[in-house]
Image (cartoon, helix red, strand yellow):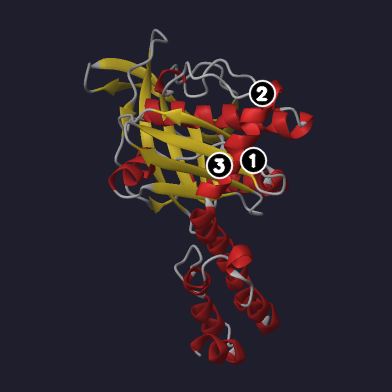
Amino acid sequence: MNIIKNKHWIKINDWEGGITYVDKSSISQKGSIVSAILKYSTNTPGIDIRSQRKTKEIIKGEQFNIKNGTHCDNYMSFVYMDDSVSDIIDLDDEWRPATDGFLTTLNYLKAWAQENHVQQKSDLIDRFFINTKDYDAFLSGLSVRKIANDDATCIASLTKDEGYMCYALTHLPSEKYISENAKYFDPTYKNVEQFNEGCKILADRLRIYLETDDYSRIPDTPPAFGDLTFDINAPDPDEEAKSAMMDSYYDSMGEANKIKFGEITGQKILQAAKRGDLEAIKRLMALPVEEGGLLLLRFLAKDENGNTALDLATINGHKDIVEYLKR
């Protein structure tokens, strides 16, 4: 993977030691976390201490939390004086406050997020892992990982199986979905980005399905995850087989749907608790399991700061909701 090829560099900061650029095509958002590739062009050459070669630019994959104003580095690479590029170095960086030049980058990404908010809310999920740590956490703990877009119209899931993982992307309003199997891979920047690029390909293919309502129009080559794809020679189902496969898929997802709907309903309850809407909470809590999911998940749902509905009601002084939730 060429870290500087086909980039759309935008100048965002002119500082004493050089210039900062962002690759606009690399910017992506997941919740309050915005990821981007940054290029730092220095006025005076630096040194790659590993090879002792002079450098003129540093390329970094960075993340910014646009809510609490922190950032961290995921990986970096050097551009040498002859325009050759070093290998990618994975970084195990800690989150820290965005100050000085990083504050300028943070403000740029905040503006980008604001401009792209409407588009993001209605879009399909096209990136699954934030970074290598995110994937590593999935490997070491979870058997199934699911994420939803902002308006809960799209669910992406990754399920562990013996020898492979199954990635599925579902558009809930239409019940159309697409899936592909991937091999387990080492938690490196290159592999995680290759997997995320496969997620984008699958999102594009699902859009074709949604626009045409014709499963046969979905491209089956190249394999979405490239050499990370598992069983790339498996034939695509015809319309009848596809229908049977979808029935089987949703049957097997019965219990998983209870979890999924419980999480979605729980987020709605959090919003109602924050604004003080007791009637909305009562209605959401009274939904049958088939519509509202597991009751325990609705009650124990947390926001990005770890607050439950009871916490939010207490913080915002909604005593009637506090009393209702304590029963």
Camera-side mark, 3 or 1? 3
Residue nearest the viewer, comparing 184 with 236: 236
Whether residue 38 is visible to the viewer of this picture, yes or no, is no
x and y percent of residue 320 in the render? 61, 91
Give me the residue at 43% from left, 33% from top.
61
Among the 4 quarters of the image, the one containing residue 282: bottom right
Image mark count: 3
Question: Which amino acid does the dot numbered 3 rest on?
Answer: Ser
Among numbered discs 2 and 1, the one appearing first in the sequence:
1
Question: Which amino acid does the dot numbered 2 rest on?
Answer: Ile
Residue 218 tag number: 2
In the picture of the structure, the residue carrying the numbered disc 1 is 124
Residue 226 drawn above or below residue 255: above
Q: Is residue 140 left or right of residue 131?
A: left
In the picture of the structure, the residue carrying the numbered disc 3 is 248
User: Which secondary structure, mark 3?
Assistant: helix
x and y percent of residue 219 in the render? 64, 19
Would you say the residues marked 3 and 1 are in contact, meaning their CB atoms lie under 8 Å apart?
no
Q: Residues within 10 Å of mark 1 (few under 14, many from 20)?
A: many
Camera-side mark, 2 or 3? 3
Residue nearest the viewer, comparing 105 with 283: 283
User: Which secondary structure, mark 2?
Assistant: loop
Q: Residues within 10 Å of mark 3 (few under 14, many from 20)?
A: few
Spatial CA distance of label 2 from label 1 is 16 Å
Residue 138 drawn above or below residue 305: above
Q: Residue furthest right?
A: 212
